[in-house]
Amino acid sequence: MRIGIDDTDSPAGMCTTYLGAVLARRLAGSGFRVTETFLVRLNPNVIYKTRGNAAICIACEGDPDTAFALACGLVDELADLACDATNPGVVVAEQPLQPSFYRKAVQDFCGIDEAVSILEGSGARYRGYKNRRGLIGAAAAVACDFEDATWELLSYRKPERWGTPRRVDRESLFSAEERTWPHTWDSVDRENDVVVCVPHTPDPVLFGIRGESPAWVGMARGYVRSEDPLIEQIFLTNQGTDAHLMPGRIGNLREGCSYLVSGTVTSAPVTGNGGHVSFILGEQGESVRCMAYEPTKGFRDIIRRLLPGDEVTIAGSYKRGSMNLEKILVRTIAQVVLTRPPRCGVCGKRMTSAGTGKGYKCRECGNRSGEPERTGVDRDLACGWYEVPPSARRHLAKPLVRGPPSAV
């Protein structure tokens, strides 16, 4: 069977993944055989999310009624039910749920009634708290079917330390990344000298390490020096897979969905207030504004090098009429040719215009020429993929160290 839980946290604390780690231990202590723990990221543009829009799923063997009672009891115990925005959902399913519901929850938007209908149709046990919104994520987690997957080791703090400054040695994190990259990634942002894997919110997470296997995240964890954790859990996850991206076409983009879109740059990039950089991408008479926001740091320098005529593919989310960039593929770059009056073939002086449509004339000797001097300009931009730095990367976004988006 699979147990799914979502929406137990709040901006003030708690973490659904922590509840999942605790539940896995309680299940094992009650005689269940836990076979896998999943961390399932859903659509990052859902406005109701607390932080990363994560749900958890535990695959195990044992009595479903006991599992349901244990899961609900733990939600009653740990979820921040006093927060108006916290509306947990618990699902225990003995039969697989439709993977299409998981994919929709990652790429689109699902309703509570839609989740309940799927749960009723499958005979799953479920409980929704308050407005029951958490049933969407809980059902989607149970329905998860990863086409690509990574792993994350999450270390959790002792309860008495929640809300206090975290003690994680900065240099040990950089050392862990240096020794295990590219098999682990996004623990730190080396270009911007920033630690990425240690949160700043008052929740139980101490730090997290992402990588391609349990062995690699475990190895990286061995280099990290920190305060003593309460527990640690390794999750199988859809993080770093681009599972949220769909093929898209300019003029047919929907608010809150994430796409891969191709087109031609039609305007020179502009740096606006706050350091945000934008340009217009066009295709078949349609256009869309593309945004590289200030937190993307050096990625904006790549965007600033674009020129009209460049052909690109962009990856990102469509929000409020703009594509918010996560990655860009520069397919072809436009040729830039400078023209200026030619030199006189007789005296070598630079000619001047003889008037519109009349060519050029040398002021020194009167010699004439009809053709300007043309010089190609080297572009400081190579074709290929570029991405935002780790400090600006979304949970679901696939780092280029893992390869380009599979849909391209």
Image (tube, helix red, strand yellow):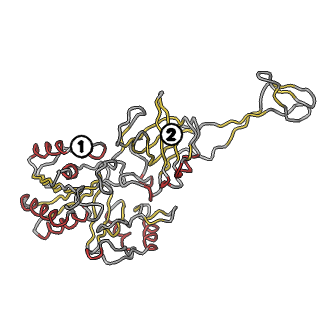
Residue 237 figure quarter: bottom left
- Label whose residue precedes the other's in the sequence (1 or 2): 1
Q: Position of residue 243 (x, y in %)?
A: 33, 47
Front-lying residue, 61 or 73: 73
Residue labelled with disc 1: 110
Figure quadrant of the C terminus: top left
Q: Nearer the viewer, mark 1 or mark 2?
A: 1
Q: Secondary structure at mark 2?
A: strand
Q: Position of residue 262 (x, y in %)?
A: 46, 37
Left or right of 354, for residue 153: left
Q: Position of residue 360 (x, y in %)?
A: 82, 27
Against 379, is 171 above or below? Answer: below
Residue labelled with disc 2: 312
Front-lying residue, 21 or 270: 270
Task: Tell me what residue is drawn at x 14 percent, y 61 percent.
Answer: 71
Q: Position of residue 242 (x, y in %)?
A: 37, 48
